[in-house]
Image: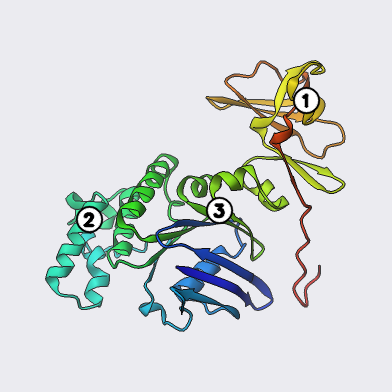
Amino acid sequence: MIEIKGVSHRFGRTRALDDVSLDIGEGEFSALLGPSGCGKTTLLRVLAGFETPDAGKVTLDGEDLLSVPPHRRPVNLMFQSFALFPHMSVERNVAYGLERERLPRREIRERVDAVLDTVGLTAYARRRPHELSGGQRQRVALARAIVKRPRLLLLDEPLSALDKQVRAEMQLELKRLQHEVGITFLVVTHDQEEAMSLADRIAVMNAGRIEQTDAPVTLYERPRTAFVAGFVGANNLFPGPDGITAVRPESIRICEGDGDGDPDAGGGRLTGTVVDVSFHGGTSHLAVRVPDLDRPVLVAVQGPSRVISGQQVSLSWPPDAAVHVPASTPVSPIEGEEP
């Protein structure tokens, strides 16, 4: 549905987007994932029409989108702050965009009633934003965004203002809403767990570029660059002559002693000292200091750990648990700046 091809953009000497290409399918829930300053919000603003790229093209159903003014694009943006009108009731907030389009009152009423029912806020229609919880305000913002029936809904860090429990509930709510209303969603987030739980496909961004686009499981199990391997989930990165070997903490087996006879040792074997053990309910996280490695090896085991800090252990992993990725290519410096 959306094709982004070769899009680049700068703010002065700062490179925000660097030859970005990405496809977004009809009805897809996609995510842009990356650290602060990687360009993901700038790309969102290009789609919304708030930024005009220096190069590249964006099409919707094959038609040029960049030439369409923001208010005429079938695209809606839900802001991180929710941006609700404090003096208006919930139903007036939701109806505002439709009223601006001068739709018939009956149609406005029907569409507002329907969307409030969808997000579970019918009983709160007459309340004002300050009378709602954070999760309820977020639902109002969502209702206001989807009531206009956009082809594409852009969500900029939509859950960052919520506490952990409400955020987990709203992740489920967002997925339910997206499937129910059938609108294509594109969410921007720096939260890996959020992206992995929400999206059908994730595009990982770094320094204005897309490093990899894949389904969450593929992205986690088979990263294609060193940045993705290190950014998506916890990972152990072992440098080698031809690149980097990545092994997830849950794939590493730990045993006391030298590990002789361990059937998993064919993939790799290290010996080190446990420097930290922490219990996280269903799993224990261990950090093992290994000679000649810059950082401790991370290990995740089910339940409480049997080993303690200071203990000598042997680590191993099966061959198919190791993923080999090329070393990162340095990003060329921007003209006029120091490398």
Q: CA distance from mark 3 to mark 1?
A: 35 Å
Q: Is 180 left or right of 106, judged from the image as shown?
A: right
Q: Secondary structure at mark 2?
A: helix
Residue 209 placement: quadrant: bottom right
Q: Which of the two discs, 3 and 1, labels the residue nearer the N terminus?
A: 3
Residue 178, percent across and down? Answer: 36, 54
SS at badge 1: helix
> What residue did someone put label 3 on?
190
Say which residue label 1 marks. Answer: 265
Q: Secondary structure at mark 3?
A: loop
Q: Which quadrant is home to the N terminus? A: bottom left
The CA span between labels 3 and 2 is 29 Å
Task: Give x and y (percent) for residue 196.
Answer: 52, 46
Q: Is residue 81 visible?
A: no
- Looking at the image, the residue that sits furthest to the left is 106
Q: Is the Cβ of the residue at disc 2 closer than 8 Å to that at disc 1?
A: no
Marks 2, 1: nearer the viewer = 1
In the image, farthest residue toward the bottom: 67
Residue toward you, 48 or 338: 48
- Horizontal placement of 269 versus 181: left or right? right
| Quarter assignment of residue 149 | bottom left
Query: Residue at 43% of width from left, 73% of height from top?
Result: 61
> Between tags 3 and 1, which lies in front?
1
Q: Which residue has dot 2 on it?
A: 116
Residue type indicated by callout 1: Ala
Q: Position of residue 256 (x, y in %)?
A: 76, 16
